[in-house]
Amino acid sequence: MEITRGTTIGWLTVLRFHSKDEYSRKFWECECKCGNETCVRESDLKRGHTRSCGCMRGWNNAKKH
């Protein structure tokens, strides 16, 4: 899967490339469906490990009770 501006994964929509770290890992600036912005590592987006800014954790826990 190619990550580019406009790609949507879960509740995240990729806005722009952010940076590379010292290990050449890419990071992308994303906007969550809840309105928050967050910086996410490309590999976490591709694998589906990160699907929101963190807001879904509370939402999923509330749904279980």
Image: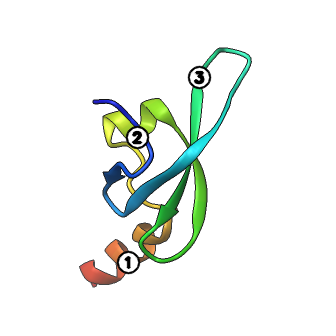
Residue on which disc 1 sits? 59
Asked if disc 1 and disc 2 are in contact, CB closer than 8 Å, the reply is: no
Please tell me how crowded label 2 is: few (under 14), some (14-19), or many (20+) other residues with Cα within 10 Å.
many
Q: Give the Cα distance between marks 1 and 2.
A: 20 Å
Q: Amino acid at mark 3?
A: Arg
Please tell me how crowded label 3 is: few (under 14), some (14-19), or many (20+) other residues with Cα within 10 Å.
few
Residue 45 disc label: 2
Q: Quarter of the image holding residue 46?
A: top left
Of 11 and 61, nearer the camera is 11
Tell me if residue 58 comes above or below residue 50 in the rendering. Answer: below
Q: Earlier in the sequence, mark 3 or mark 1?
A: 3
Tell me if residue 41 comes above or below residue 32 in the rendering. Answer: above
Of 14 and 52, nearer the camera is 14
Where residue 42 sits in the image (x, y, percent)? 48, 33
Asked if disc 2 and disc 3 are in contact, CB closer than 8 Å, the reply is: no
Q: Amino acid at mark 1?
A: Trp
Mark 1 residue element: helix
Where residue 39 sits in the image (x, y, percent)? 61, 49
Identify the residue at image location x=48%, y=71%: 55
Residue 25 disc label: 3
Left or right: residue 18 versus residue 6 is: right
